[in-house]
Image (cartoon, grey):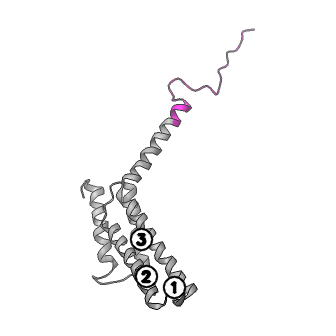
């Protein structure tokens, strides 16, 4: 009786990349994505904004929890709260003035704007209206990001 020649069903075809080659390719792709994120300036300024906001939130929580007197009195505590608020405001202006350089950066800016606009709405949840509102600041930032995405220039 003739013998059967059975191929190893787990053997990879010669024309397909090895598992080691595929792993190296995946690692290179991940490195490109991470490098793009690190080189887009919008991520840095969004992180700075978040640090400033967290500092203001923490101090505001301390005022609510401990009271003005425990923090040096109303004048001292209000001065510190104002300083942190100005840092937070300056950071938001910096974010809105930064043009993202990658698609991931543009998406991060859009997510930032969505959150920022929601934080600056009216007490009933409706958005602000008028020319001196958050929308007057947000629109130019989004327009710059969109123009960069579509035309490749800022």
Determine if the magenta segment contains residue 17.
yes
The secondary structure type at the circle numbered 2 is: helix
Which is nearer the eye, 33 or 60?
60
CA separation in Å, label 1 and label 2: 9 Å
Part of the protein shown in magenta: 1-23
Task: Give me the disc on residue 71.
Answer: 1
**Contact (Cβ within 8 Å) of mark 1 with mark 2:** yes
Task: Give me the disc on residue 80.
Answer: 2
Q: Is residue 131 left or right of residue 110?
A: left
Quadrant assignment, res 101 = bottom left
Residue at image location 35% in from the left, 67% down from the top: 95
Instruction: Judge depth for marks 2 and 3 and give the one in front.
Output: 2
Mark 3 highlights which residue? 114
- Which secondary structure type mostly characterizes the magenta part of the structure? loop
Query: Does label 2 or label 3 sit earlier along the sequence?
Result: 2
Question: Vertically, is 101 above or below 58?
Answer: above
């Amino acid at each position: 009786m003739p013998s059967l020649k059975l191929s190893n069903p787990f053997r990879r075809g010669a024309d397909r990349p090895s598992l080691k080659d595929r792993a190296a390719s995946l690692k290179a792709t991940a490195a490109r994505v991470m490098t793009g994120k690190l080189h887009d300036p919008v991520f840095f300024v969004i992180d700075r904004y978040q640090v400033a906001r967290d500092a203001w939130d923490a101090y505001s929580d301390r005022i609510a929890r401990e009271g003005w007197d425990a923090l040096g009195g109303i004048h001292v505590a209000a001065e510190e709260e104002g300083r942190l608020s100005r840092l937070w405001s300056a950071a938001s202006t910096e974010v809105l003035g930064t043009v993202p350089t990658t698609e991931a950066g543009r998406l991060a800016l859009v997510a930032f704007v969505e959150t920022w606009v929601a934080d600056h709405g009216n007490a009933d949840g409706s958005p602000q209206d008028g020319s001196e509102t958050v929308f007057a600041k947000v629109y130019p930032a989004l327009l710059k990001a969109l123009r960069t995405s579509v035309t490749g220039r800022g």
